[in-house]
Amino acid sequence: MTLLRRAHQDVKEMAKVAERERIARDLHDLLGHTLSVIALKSELASKLADRDPARATDEIREVERVSRDALAEVRAAVEGYKRRGFSGEIREARLVLASAGVRLDVEVGDIPLLPRQETVLALALRESVTNVVRHARASVCRVVLGLEHGDVVLTVQDDGSGGLPREGNGLAGMRERVTGAGGALNIEAANGFRVSVRFPPASAT
């Protein structure tokens, strides 16, 4: 009986550790992305303050919006939350990249996704866009979501010269989430930086 209780206790402790790790990864993704956006927009507003006050004001309002959204997402992350989905991340990516002077080209097919797949793809897109803004020195970022031989494939490709970044917490967390959901992640630097997430049909069952 003592061994059984100990086993149950071990399971509970493992569940707590896993949940803490999940929250830590999610908070890293949320805050890393958001703080990058806030820094970018604040810097842009400062540069525009003298020559284009109206646009500087718009950028500051965007900083306020992003900050409020981030606060709501952090609260939701601690509670166990639903994110804004892949389409919402596309909209946010367009705003963020535009502020960095990067054009976003999007090709997204009408593909039914499982909720877990959509969450993983949305966070992969978010982390990829954050890397483009921070490291790529790009002018164009292309996002493609479609089917290849039955697999669901997301590709994020920029035309920058930033090279292959060190696989820190963001990329490591992305890899862990993708593989945990039954997918595969490929990262390469060739004519820019390319992130590819692939879910085989078996992962949709």
Image (cartoon, grey):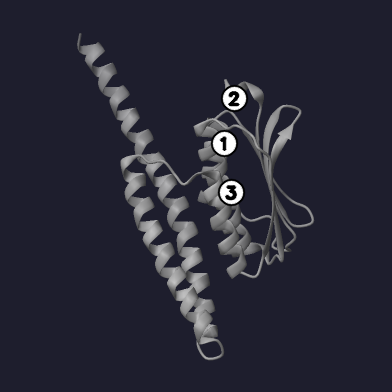
Amino acid type at image mark 1: Val
View extreme (bottom): residue: 50
- At x 72%, y 27%, the residue is 150
Pair 3/1: label in front: 3
Q: In this rendered view, identify the residue nearer to me: 157 or 113.
A: 113
SS assignment at label 3? helix
| Most foreground residue, 141 or 86 | 86
Of circles 2 and 1, the one toward us is 2
Instruction: Farthest residue to the right: give it.
Output: 191
Q: Nearer the viewer, residue 120 or 61?
A: 61
Q: Which mark is residue 125?
A: 3
Residue 176 visible in the shown view = no
Q: Residues within 10 Å of mark 2 (few under 14, many from 20)?
A: some
| Mark 3 residue type | Leu
Judge from the rendering whether residue 71 lies leftward or rightward of residue 3; answer left or right. right
Q: Quadrant of the C terminus?
A: top right
Residue at the limit of the structure toward the left, as seen here: 2
Per the image, label 2 sits on a secondary structure element best described as: helix
Mark 1, residue position: 178
Return the residue at label 2.
203
Task: Give the percent coordinates (x, y) of residue 40.
Answer: 53, 71
Left or right for 47, reference 74: right
Along the horizontal axis of the image, is 78 left or right of 204? Answer: left
- Gap between marks 2 and 1 measured at Cα: 11 Å
Q: Can you say whether 65 is above or below 21 in the image? A: below
Q: Residue at x 39, y 46 (%)?
A: 24
Q: Position of residue 32 (x, y in %)?
A: 47, 58
**Taking 179 as reference, is 195 above or below it?**
below
Q: Residues within 10 Å of mark 3 (few under 14, many from 20)?
A: many
| CA distance for labels 2 and 3 | 19 Å
